[in-house]
Each structure stands twice: as C-alpha cells, then as structure tokens.
Image: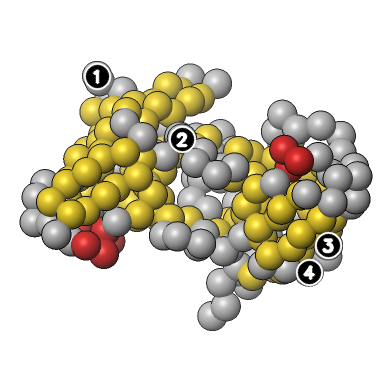
Amino acid sequence: AQSVTQLGSHVSVSEGALVLLRCNYSSSVPPYLFWYVQYPNQGLQLLLKYTSAATLVKGINGFEAEFKKSETSFHLTKPSAHMSDAAEYFCAVGGSYIPTFGRGTSLIVHP
Amino acid sequence: DAGVTQSPTHLIKTRGQQVTLRCSPISGHKSVSWYQQVLGQGPQFIFQYYEKEERGRGNFPDRFSARQFPNYSSELNVNALLLGDSALYLCASSLASGGSNTGELFFGEGSRLTVL
C-alpha cells in the first residue's frame, strides 16, 4: 500500500522568497517519488523524480527536492519564487504499477 | 514529437447519458492510464492498460470501462452519467517496459466533462 500527504492546501509567498511545499509518503516497498506541476486548464507536467539514486534531486525551473527516508518526506523547494511559478503542485508515490497522488498544494506568488 | 493527445477537450452531457473519451499516447509508449480529477483534488486512478491488457483498476463503479487498441490508443467509457462524474479526465502514457513502471507519467491536457 502507498499514500501521500501534502501539508497545506495553499502556500502563499512573495516573489523572490523561498518556496517550500511539503510532502510525506507511506509505502510498503522502496518508493519512487515525484513532483508534478499543473497550470490552469492544463495536464500535469513532471518537475522531478526520485528513483533511489541521489537523495537530492534537481528538476526543471529551479526546483529541487530532498528524499529523507527517516522522515518519510520529499519536500519541494525553490530558492526564489517567480510569478510564473503560481500553479498547483502534486506529490506522487510510485514503486508499484500505479502512482498515487496527493491532494495538491496551490502555490500563490504575490508581487 | 507529439505528446499525449486527448479528445474531446470539453463536453457537456446530461444525467443518464453515456460518454466516450479518447487518448493517443506518446509514440513508443505502450501503457495508458486514466485518472479522474475533481476540482480542487488530486488525480484519482481509474484504469491502467499495458499491451492492451488491463493492469490495474481503481475504486470506481462498473459504469466506468476502458480499452486499449492495437495502436496503443485508448478509450474511457462512462455509462449512466451522474452529476458527480463532472471532472477533468486525464490520460497519461508511460513506457512501462518489462511490465514494471517507475511511475513517470506523461499527461495529456485532459477532457473536461460537465454533467448537468
């Protein structure tokens, strides 16, 4: 069995501020972990993935995430938010055939 | 290369009607998955097909069915539509080589279904 919990349905930051989106997972097998981004009226786009190599994973658009097994976490960060980062972000856990998605966190970026 | 394409992009149906949604995967991808995304929620898994066989089914009623064709395209059918079926239906393709799946999915832009 596997599940994902995203803490905070909405996160609001100022442009230029640090972005931190939280994700905790549960998995009975070694997990594959993913972050996807969804812009309004679009499908989901892969930001980055962890597949048991380096624990710090770098993705597109300056995002990165760190896998912490002891904390069962895979939080997403970006040092400096841009207005264009405003979107819905989904954490997902795989490792079996079927990835399971979290409920999503809406990132709001203020000028 | 073309990404995952879905049709139609938007449609409106009334309760009790039936709907068919279509998906063409990325060239070379043999697995197609369907997800339902209700407004404000994450995608919920409906079906996965690999090499034309059903590999997984989510917790959805029998009114939902799907199939995959020899060219790996797929259809999702929903019968006896309910108001609660209103959602964005997402199709995703993946390589899924050897029957395993690292989980990396490539999504289409979805079909937005409104049931009145």
Residue at the image point whose x is 49% and y is 51% from the top: B104
In the image, taking residue B54 as reference, residue A28 lies left or right, namely: left
Q: Real-space Cα distance between discs 3 and 1? A: 43 Å
Instruction: Tell us which disc is closer to us: 4 or 2.
Output: 2
Asked if the residues shown at circle 1 and circle 2 are in contact, with their CB atoms under 8 angstroms apart, the answer is no
Report the residue marked by disc 2.
A103
Q: Nearer the viewer, residue B36 or B83?
A: B83
Label 1 is placed on what type of residue?
Answer: Ser
Report the residue marked by disc 3.
B69
SS label for mark 2: loop
Residue A70: which disc? Answer: 1
Q: Nearer the viewer, residue B13 or B33?
A: B13
Residue B71: which disc? Answer: 4
Give the letter of the chain under mark 2.
Answer: A
Question: Please, is residue A37 above or below residue A7 in the view?
Answer: below
Q: Real-space Cα distance between discs 3 and 2? A: 31 Å
SS label for mark 1: loop
Q: Are marks 3 and 1 on the same chain?
A: no
